[in-house]
Amino acid sequence: MTLEHRARLYTTFGSRLKKLRLTKGLTPTQFSEQCGIDSSNLAKYENGSREPGLAVVMIMAKSLGITHQELLNFEFDFPDSALTSS
């Protein structure tokens, strides 16, 4: 996967995360405290400049009151070349 594909994927995930957080009426500070993560890391996840690990994804989903499947339920189309590139 190219760096461009990764950046698009992280940005798409970040937008989904932010939308769900806002839907729950949580400020970034409230949400980061609930998750036990630093608010600067949350900002990076939401703007797509950092990828959360699996454990963080699970914690964020639980804090939002949803499943990890719901958190990861977004459309992202990988070009064929992204699937064969390292």
Image (cartoon, helix red, strand yellow):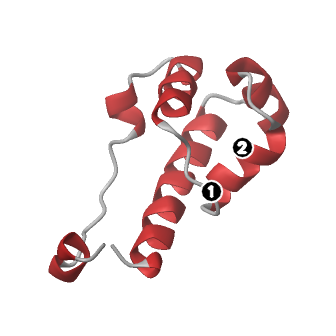
Judge from the rendering whether residue 85 lies leftward or rightward of residue 65; answer left or right.
Answer: left
Q: Position of residue 36 (x, y in %)?
A: 74, 22
Q: Position of residue 16 (x, y in %)?
A: 50, 49
In the depicted structure, whether residue 26 falls above or below residue 78: above
Which of 37 and 65 lies nearest the eye of the viewer? 37
Between disc 2 and disc 1, the foreground one is: 1
Q: Residue at x 70, y 30 (%)?
A: 25
Kindly identify which residue carries mark 2: 42
Q: Residue at x 30, y 63 (%)?
A: 76
In the depicted structure, whether residue 85 falls above or below residue 57: below
Considering only order in the chain, which callout, 1 or 2, is on the residue closer to the N terminus? 2
Q: Position of residue 2 (x, y in %)?
A: 38, 78
Which of 24 and 83 lies nearest the eye of the viewer? 83
> How many angstroms separate mark 2 from mark 1 (CA)?
9 Å
Quarter of the picture holding the C terminus: bottom left
Q: Amino acid at mark 2?
A: Leu
Kindly identify which residue carries mark 1: 50
Give the crowd class for mark 1: few <14, some 14-19, many >=20 residues within 10 Å. some
Judge from the rendering whether residue 13 lies leftward or rightward of residue 50; answer left or right.
Answer: left
